[in-house]
Image (tube, grey):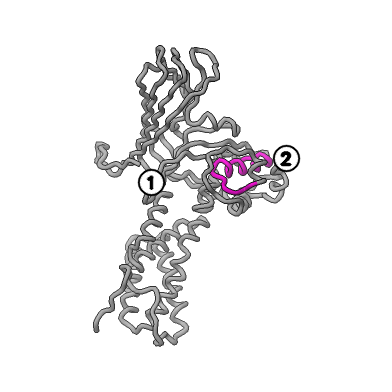
Amino acid sequence: MKRPRYRNNQAFPLSISGNNQSSNPKLKPALRLVTKLVCSILVGKFSKIVRLLALVCFLIVPALVQASNHGKLASAQVALQSILDTAPDQIRKGNFITGLSFATLDVLVNGLTHDNENYLRRILDLFVSQRILFVQKYEMKFPSKIQSAEFKLFSPMSTDGQIVNWQGFSSNKALKINKNKITVFLNGDSSCVIKICSLVETNFVNQPDVFYSSLGKGSNRNSFTSEISKNISVVKDLYDFVNFFGTYAFNGKLLPIQNILMNPFNIDCSEFSTIVLEILHDKNIPARYALGVSFPLSERPKITEHCWVRASLHGKEVDIDPTYGRKIGQIAYGCKLPFVLYLGSVESLNDIYSFPISVVRLNQQTEKLSVRRISSYSVYRFSGGDKNGKKRSKERF
């Protein structure tokens, strides 16, 4: 019998037309049960032999079904597809292993299509550790010639899920470094270039108990979000509120909370972080703006400055990213994402204006002078390496 040819590199088609559908009503639930059983074995605490046998058996089943009539094939596909469609939902709900298993089965069943390849890349972004060289370059131009300038600088620092192995500073002028402050001696010049290179390892850190943590009863704080905070008792309530509030669009502004509530459209990461921060403060929970950059894998990689919230819940330092929470689900509440670099934190919205670099003093005096800044970021991702730690490949975004 001539083997049918299928499009889109599929192992077997998504649907089959015809009147020869299966009349056996027990086939669909049986295949669904077998698929769930195999998934449980693959992700459970079983030996490698048992997992291998389960995988082999699962791969043989589609071949046996394919050898039968088209009616059984269609029923098998419908039963399996109902499970595969839940992969994104499982991951958004925090069931990472189940979602990854379903996503892997989707590749086995339908082949590596363009859509699920991009989806798997986004999923790998969440769990795969990154070893990168992050380069910050700032070109500062002053309206008049000065002798020296002192800058406050944000750069990568070691924290949970992020380790800075090396960091170097350079400039086209003489400089002096004191923690996060840099003094550049311009000697009458009106411009300078500052460059910071950081070798950073980022890892996925998961705190699954955060999502259902209690936020307490709160205080009698008089704020614009006090009425909203009364309906929020756990972190999950905060997640549900932010997900259905407003629309996202980059605006390049730092809007106060009253403006956000009056016009919740076209707001970006700083506004969503302000909402979460105000509600946490209503609950008498210490929280700050966390500032950094994100560099997710995609067809067109782009490095962007990013803002989220770092709070202290029950004695633990927790990252809450409401912007990415709208994209990838509850995993962004309480987890350290490997594709987000943490550069520092600030207390108030006005302090964000000092990110990523700001002038503290000019000519040894606190002078208010307009400074033109040109910023550029580069991320080199290293993969592989031999025992001596040599890098074999790198990408620049």
Residue 369 in view: yes
Location of residue 48 in the rendering, given as x and y in whole percent from the top left corner: 33, 60
- Residue 57 is tagged as none
**Can you tell which quarter of the image residue 275 is in?**
top right
Location of residue 15 in the rendering, given as x and y in whole percent from the top left corner: 40, 76
**Can you tell which quarter of the image residue 108 is in?**
bottom left
Label 2, label 1: how far apart the Cα atoms are: 43 Å
Q: Does the magenta stretch include residue 281?
A: yes
From the viewer's perspective, tell me whether residue 72 is left or right of residue 326.
left
Task: Tell me the chief SS of the magenta region.
Answer: helix
Q: Of the two numbered discs 2 and 1 on the same chain, state the one appearing first in sequence.
A: 2
Location of residue 305 in the rendering, given as x and y in whole percent from the top left corner: 47, 38
- Residue 301 is tagged as 1
Q: What residue type is labelled 1?
A: Pro
From the viewer's perspective, tell me whether residue 124 is left or right of residue 320.
left
What is the secondary structure assignment of the residue under circle 1?
loop
Quarter of the figure with the C terminus:
top left
Q: Give the range drawn in magenta.
A: 263-283
**Residue indicated by mark 2:** 219
Location of residue 21 in the rendering, given as x and y in whole percent from the top left corner: 41, 85
* Mark 2 or mark 1, whichever is nearer to me: 1
98 up-or-down from 57: above or below = above
What is the secondary structure assignment of the residue under circle 2?
loop
